[in-house]
Amino acid sequence: MPMGAILVENLVKDYPTRKGVVRALSGVSFRVAEGEIVGLLGANGAGKTTIIKILCGLVRATAGKAEIFGVPTYRAEVTRYVAALLEGSRNVYWRLSVEENLRFFAGLQGISLREAKKRTEELIHFFGLWEKRKVTANLLSQGMKQKLALACALVKGTPVLLLDEPTLGLDVEASHELRRLIRELALSQEKTVVLSSHDMGVVEDTCARVIILSRGRVIADDLVRNLLSLFRTRAYRVNLRNGLPEGVLSKLSVRFPTLRWIPEERALQVEIPPGGSFYELVDLLREAQIEIEGLSRSEPDLEDVFLRLIQSEKKESQ
Amino acid sequence: MNRIYTFFAIFTRFLIELKRYPFNTLSSLATLYLIFLLLFAGARYAQGFGVNIFGEGLEALVVGYLVWTFALAAYSDLSWEIMREAQQGTLEQLYMCPFGFRFVSLAWVVSSFLSSFVFAGVLLGLMMLTTGKVLHLPLGTILPLSFLTLAPIYGVGFVMAGLALVFKRIQAFFQILQFAFIPLLFLSGDSFWAKALPLSLGANLIRAVMVEGKTLIELPTLDLLMLLGTACFYFGLGLGIFKICEDLAKDRGLLAHY
């Protein structure tokens, strides 16, 4: 069993405002083992960034415990173990070159000049920034700035890495490249990574485990594959060559209440109820002389899981 | 992990940014020199009417102006830097230094002091050329005296930096405060209360060194002890208020916002 890298226990955070106290976290608890890659998912205001900032020691918790390798996160020495990429690319000095930025952040961590030089060169090669190493950050593309910001977090050589919206503002290609780099890094350098994002694709692509937050509470904490299988249904999509004649949908709906007609795709979407059979639907369509063009089974993705969990949490709280 | 490497990184970045913004550096120097020229012209004009507006003479004006420019940099550099860092999104990264943000700030303050010293040296050279007055420059005396004179102002700088963390926009307050230093520079410095205020005793001692040619040993021991005491008191007070503001900012999650 790997050692616990991060411990969060009954974490509460209240922000005092002019209109009163706003509760951002209401008793959040979780643990992250060494070498794990965990995603934090949640809508705006769910508490993701607050958790990350408490773990970096940038925000003080109102109550509860947050520790990294046993060090409380309100102590400055916690930063020996943790580095963070916050708010995308806004973490680098725009008037410093790629090389100067990396050396500065290594020095800030108290790393010797020789070691800083070595790490800087390694990271510049790893991120494919060699050609741009003398270029100031303000002249880099958004994707390169984001890579540089990630490299600046990595140059510190901490075992824990916190990434808050690492792909924010990136185009699809740059986002996929950054996801690949995060996966590679986590595996090759055995980093413990906590990644928060609005983008389900980023979390699904990079994290084995996901913690879903809603209004400052953890509503799910499991492996991505377990959550997906939990919500896996017998859902099918049936494409019809000539569309659906009038009146047929109501007849079919008696037997299959979840049946939905998508006219623009000329497709039927259906979830087979327990005890039901997909062949029954095929038989009914054949009887009505409707020609099937194709069929596919639809698998839930993390976005479906997230939406269902959030919806059921809302229903429960009402 | 070593604090020396952290200090070196901060000092190097300070120098790189100075070099990368040459126009800003040179225009600051030109502005201060132009203000001095105006003061100098005014003093010469007044002397024509038999009015000596700068007491003992132009030497006092040169030294007073020099200490004032030094003080301006001392109290504003850190707070401007904090506002700039918060604006560009790097302040939180500085807070993640294993030696704490106060160490980062102190390293910044030392870098700023060293660069101000060079800057003040250039300005002094220009002022001596303009006035034709040659001042005494025993570096071994001036360097520690300047440091102790400016320590309370760095304390004020930490208070301003703390206020910048919490309130973000404090530029108007800055402008008021820079003129509040002027009377302190020209207090006679005989009474206990005048000596206990920031800047006045130090400015008088620097004047005694640069104008009268006194050395550190020749200065009154009690005055030197008083200077050391005020330096520690105001600097410590500034750090204490900064810590309170820092805690408030962390509690309210204000470090990243501008």
Image (cartoon, coloured by chain):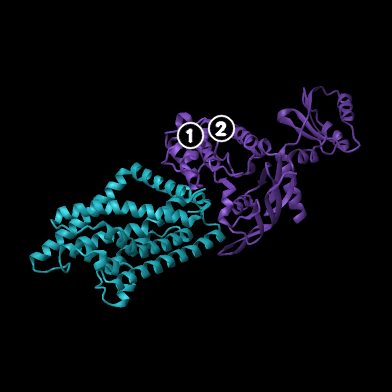
Q: What crowding class fits label 2: few (fewer than 14 Cα within 10 Å), some (14-19), or many (20 or more)? A: some
Between A201 and A257, the one nearer to me in the picture: A201
Image mark for residue A132: none
Respond whether the residues carrying marks 2 and 1 are from the same subunit. Answer: yes
Q: Which residue is mark 1?
A: A141
Which quadrant would residue A59 be assigned to in this image?
A: bottom right
Chain assignment, label 1: A
Q: Which residue is mark 2?
A: A174
Chain in purple (letter):
A
In the picture as drawn, the residue positioned furthest to the front comes out as: B217
Q: Position of residue A77 (x, y in %)?
A: 57, 54
Residue B164 on image: x %, y %: 44, 59
Q: Residue furthest right?
A: A275
On the image, the x and y values in percent for residue A232 come to: 80, 37
Residue A154 x, y percent position in the rendering? 55, 40
Label 2's element? helix
Q: CA distance from mark 2 to mark 1?
A: 10 Å
Q: In the displayed structure, would residue A225 be above or below residue B10? A: above
| Residue drawn 33% across the image and 51% down it | B115
Q: Report the side of A176 relative to B45 (left or right).
A: right
Would residue B80 be seen by someone viewing this image from the given angle? no
Q: Say if A119 sits above or below B48 in the image.
A: above
Locate residue A150 relative to residue A186 in the image: left or right.
Answer: left
* Label whose residue precedes the other's in the sequence (2 or 1): 1
Question: In which chain is the residue bearing label 2?
Answer: A
Q: Look at label 2 and name its amino acid.
A: Ala
Q: Amino acid at mark 1?
A: Ser
Question: Would residue A123 be visible to someone looking at this image?
Answer: yes
Callouts 2 and 1 close, C-beta under 8 Å: yes
